[in-house]
Image (cartoon, helix red, strand yellow):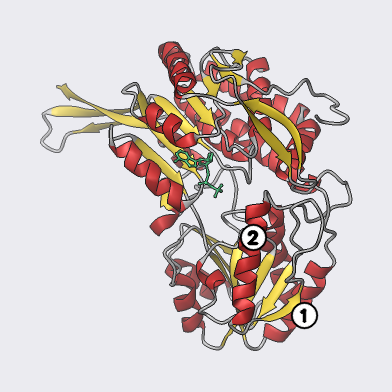
Amino acid sequence: VVPDAKGGFAIPTDLLIADKWTAGTSGKRIDVLNPSTGEVLTSVADATVADGLSAVDAAAAAAASWAATPPRARANVLQRCFQSMLEHADWLAQIISLENGKALPDARGEVLYAAEFFRWYAEEAVRINGDLAIAPAGGNRIVVQYQPIGIALLITPWNFPAAMATRKIAPALAAGCTCILKPAEETPLTALAVGEILRRAGVPAGVVNMVNTSDPGPLCSAILRDMRVRKLSFTGSTEVGKILLREASYNVINSSMELGGNAPFLVLDDADLDAAIEGAMIAKMRNAGEACTAANRFYVQEGIYPAFVEKLVEKMGALKLGAGTDTTTQCGAMINRAAIEKITSLVDDAVAKGAKVKLGGKVGEGAGFFYPPSVLADVPLNANLIREEIFGPVAAIVPFKDVEDAIRMANDTEYGLSAYVYTGDLKRGMQISERLEYGMVALNRGLVSDPAAPFGGVKQSGLGREGAHHGLLEFTEAKYIAVSW
Ligand code: ADP
């Protein structure tokens, strides 16, 4: 599939169970499309519920020995995974571009980001420290240690097929857990390629298992209802997150949820215009807008508004739209036809309600799933894209006069993942950041993601955090031992 597979190997297309690639029991395959052309790239095995439970068997068989593996030995495995991902970076980037459609620079950026989770959690694996306290009454000691939570089901989306997988696998392994990854139907190849990299890097049999399926509901529910499974870590839509929380409630499974976002991007009059534009380009156009952290709504103060709109149109208009794997492409394809239809309907709705099209705004012809970089100005607050995630290269801009109004508009959503603020006054920026009801705020920056920082949302954007030490603790349970003294 991958041209110039330099430094690569044959990409697996089956299920990874107990260190073996297997076609599973369904006899069926799932087609994987190239969003840049609409053509079928290849097909992957389609797991049944029985295959999913075989993966649980494999994870269960490996659980005790992996949990008992010394932290330093686990760290060494993770360090080898980090090195190996870097060695295969160009190859993996091509796979990502092919099946996801994103531009190669975005894909390379993702591979490096994805690899960093292995480095970070190799370092964290040896720092799972507990506590020792004297009980207030003085009669006993309180010992707390963090034990691996147990077998984890990891469910990932298609927008960052490598990074969303490693952001879960690395802390699970560091904590001493074994796992089953269910990648998104649209982008299984990246996950499977990562799976083979991990095998070759020495991850023991059964510690990481992978099951692709065309019907995730029954398979994931069956895994969550297996008493041996103790953890769910999900990244995807709020809608599916709610379904999974209900499924997890059956056996009271500990759940980490990274769900949808609706990020506001505030630009105050005193902001450095060039810096704000540079940040806006990253926050909006990284991954062609297909990110849960993507700036969805720009609130720009009146004094800087005309200049901001003009410059953003200029910069977004200069981006080259094209196939992800074409090295000159700066804005790749959307994931599928449905994504194009959703973006089109959001843009048409905003325009019908009075938004002004400053750039793009119309889908082009052709077989691939392309939407051009677009800028809508004077977007009315009743437009659907003010409430819903666009997940595409469309910037919706709203003017404001009073900063209090901007904060109110920014918080007026059921989501709370990430927000962006640009101002020349750092203290004011900090004060505004504290009042934004978001799990993450980027202050005079266009990017929040960092493996060393706790990534996650409030409200309906999720539960728990990934990355940092927080992400490790999500895969542990605090064990308290009361010691008589
Ligand atoms: P997106 O809208 O980004 O595609 P989804 O929430 O639909 O996000 O998908 C994210 C992940 O959730 C994918 O791996 C998908 O297969 C999986 N998924 C979708 N529906 C279910 C379900 N009912 N149970 C478990 N996983 C699901």
Q: Which residue is located at x 74 percent, y 48 percent?
A: 102
Residue 467: image x %, image y %?
52, 41
Whole-angstrom CA distance, mark 2 to mark 1, is 27 Å
**Residue 74 horizontal/vertical position (percent):** 53, 19
Using the rendered view, name the quadrant where residue 120 is placed. Answer: top right
The amino acid on which the numbered mark 2 sits, given as a three-letter code, is Glu
Q: Is residue 126 visible?
A: no
Apparent side of residue 147 relative to residue 349 in the rendered image (left or right): left
Residue 422, above or below 79: below
Residue drawn 44% across the image and 71% down it = 411
Query: Is residue 407 or residue 130 the one in the foreground?
Result: 407
| Amino acid on which disc 1 is placed | Glu
Looking at this view, name the residue that lies furthest to the front. Answer: 27
Residue 96 % position (x, y): 72, 39
Mark identifier at residue 341: 2
Residue 45 image point, x, y percent: 61, 24
Q: Where is the N terminus found, in terms of image quarters?
A: top right
Q: Nearer the viewer, residue 141 or 226?
A: 226
- For the residues labelled 2 and 1, say whether their Cβ atoms are less than 8 Å apart: no
Q: Which residue is mark 1?
A: 310
